[in-house]
Image: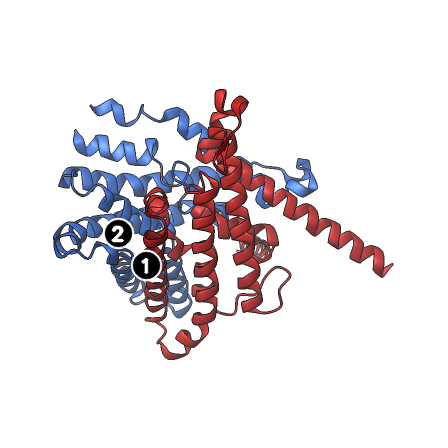
């Protein structure tokens, strides 16, 4: 039916616009490691692993696509991504075994981070303020790292009252329990994405003001 | 009873999407096409079940005894992708070219989903103490959990009228707030569902 086709076309166009907004890039890069960001140290670790995985896959996706067949493409790229993350896990285990244990299954899940998957699916993925895939990857990696560190900072501060080894007596005495749960992490990420949206809106308004 | 206990614990108490924040990106994207929520949720259910069902014996029979459990992510991704694409090839047999292309895209989407990797990884973490009943229930329940998450979020998100949402909250932020509220709801049933069959 023509009406259904128009609705589907509109939905596909909305999805294509959504995945290229800076707020979605921040969310997609951070969501996979969000549950592990329960403290600043954990946030730094999972943020670093996610950022490195995003950049490495953005660099490797195009040359690997050129030498693999259509049906082997996705499994090969997934295996390379998993290998990169396994090597990063070894490094994490040597650097800090306690953080490696705290991160649990979320460390290998960086191999299928939302933005890593985007580059596996489409090696020419370009979004946000960047004009090329590598620029997009670097932008996404930095955003994911900063976001996960911030989420870890907020979760650690409000859930335990401790940050950077210092304890805030009032918060330690009566912690805000929601920040130790998935719901709290999602709310903090929503705050970050709202901030990103406000920057994008301000930039668009100043560009429109400049044109007038 | 262990099977049902593991099934409902995995589906509701420890829901992989809203309890462990795994596979949320596809839940957000599926919400933009609510008419496909059941089909995508069902495909994810099957993919997670297959990944869990194969992952547990692979870990218990090959990776752990040989001391190469660090290779688990690579092996699971390879095996899951092979199973998903094999299933897709069977489903796409004797179909039109456009339909085959859509099935291939769906298979690619399932293969890169975090929940398909997380299911066998989390089962491997408890492989020492889990029996086959528990592993089967966990794999089936994890798939059921992601099906519930995809469908519920799609229909709840469809009810949001973005004209009433402030400008900076439109799009991703309101989706995240909705997901946070759903995560709170799942926290509310934690300990109830799995405890029914003890």
The image position of residue B187, as x and y in percent, is 40, 28
Q: Residue at x 22, y 41 (%)?
A: B126
Q: Secondary structure at mark 1?
A: helix
Colour of chain A, in one word, is red
Residue A53 is left or right of residue A7, and the answer is left
Q: Chain of mark 1?
A: A
**What is the number of the mark on residue A86?**
1
- Chain B as rendered: colour: blue
Residue A47: percent from left, percent from top: 47, 51
User: Residue A84: x and y, percent?
Assistant: 36, 63
Q: Is residue B102 above or below residue A174?
A: below
Against A211, residue B164 (above or below) is above
Q: Mark 2: few, some, or many residues within 10 Å (few <14, many ≥20)?
A: many
> Which chain is disc 2 placed on?
B
Q: Residue furthest bottom?
A: A67
* Residue A53 in sight in this render: yes
Whether residue B4 is situated above or below residue A116 in the rendered picture: above
- Nearer the observer, disc 2 or disc 1? 1
The quarter of the rendered structure image containing the C terminus of chain A is bottom right
Which residue is rendered at x = 58% and y = 69% of the image? A132
Q: Going by the image, does B33 lie left or right of A21?
A: left
Work out whether residue A190 or residue A74 is closer to the camera in this orientation and state it: A190
Residue B51's disc number: 2
Left or right: A19 as drawn, with respect to A180: right
């Amino acid at each position: 039916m023509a009406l259904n086709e128009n609705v589907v076309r509109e939905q596909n166009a909305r999805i294509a616009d959504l995945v290229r907004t800076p707020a979605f890039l921040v969310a997609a890069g951070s969501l996979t490691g969000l549950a592990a960001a329960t403290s600043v140290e954990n946030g730094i670790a999972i943020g670093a692993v996610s950022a490195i995985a995003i950049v490495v896959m953005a660099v490797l996706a195009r040359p690997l696509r050129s030498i693999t067949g259509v049906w082997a493409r996705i499994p090969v790229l997934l295996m390379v991504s998993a290998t990169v993350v396994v090597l990063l896990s070894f490094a994490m285990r040597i650097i800090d075994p306690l953080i490696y244990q705290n991160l649990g299954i979320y460390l290998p899940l960086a191999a299928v981070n939302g933005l890593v998957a985007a580059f596996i699916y489409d090696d020419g993925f370009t979004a946000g303020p960047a004009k090329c895939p590598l620029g997009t990857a670097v932008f996404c990696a930095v955003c994911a790292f900063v976001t996960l560190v911030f989420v870890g900072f907020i979760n650690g501060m409000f859930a335990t009252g401790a940050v950077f080894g210092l304890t805030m007596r009032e918060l330690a005495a009566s912690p805000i329990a929601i920040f130790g749960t998935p719901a709290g992490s999602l709310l903090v990420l929503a705050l970050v994405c709202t901030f990103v949206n406000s920057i994008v809106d301000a930039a668009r308004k100043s560009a429109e003001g400049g044109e007038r | 009873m262990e099977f049902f206990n593991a099934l409902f614990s995995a589906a509701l108490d420890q829901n992989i999407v809203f309890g462990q924040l795994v596979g949320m990106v596809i839940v957000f994207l599926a919400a933009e096409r609510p008419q496909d929520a059941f089909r995508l949720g069902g495909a994810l259910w099957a993919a997670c079940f297959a990944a869990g069902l194969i992952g547990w014996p692979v870990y218990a029979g090959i990776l752990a005894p040989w001391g190469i459990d660090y290779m688990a992510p690579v092996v699971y991704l390879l095996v899951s992708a092979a199973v998903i694409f094999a299933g897709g090839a069977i489903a796409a047999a004797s179909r039109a070219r456009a339909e085959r292309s859509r099935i291939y895209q769906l298979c690619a989407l399932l293969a890169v989903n975090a929940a398909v990797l997380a299911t066998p990884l989390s089962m491997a973490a408890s492989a020492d103490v889990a029996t086959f009943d528990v592993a089967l229930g966990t794999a089936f329940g994890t798939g059921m959990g992601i099906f519930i998450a995809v469908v519920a979020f799609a229909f709840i998100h469809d009810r949001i009228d973005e004209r009433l949402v402030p400008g900076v909250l439109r799009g991703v932020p309101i989706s995240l707030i909705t997901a946070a509220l759903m995560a709170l709801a799942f926290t509310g049933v934690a300990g109830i569902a799995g405890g029914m069959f003890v």
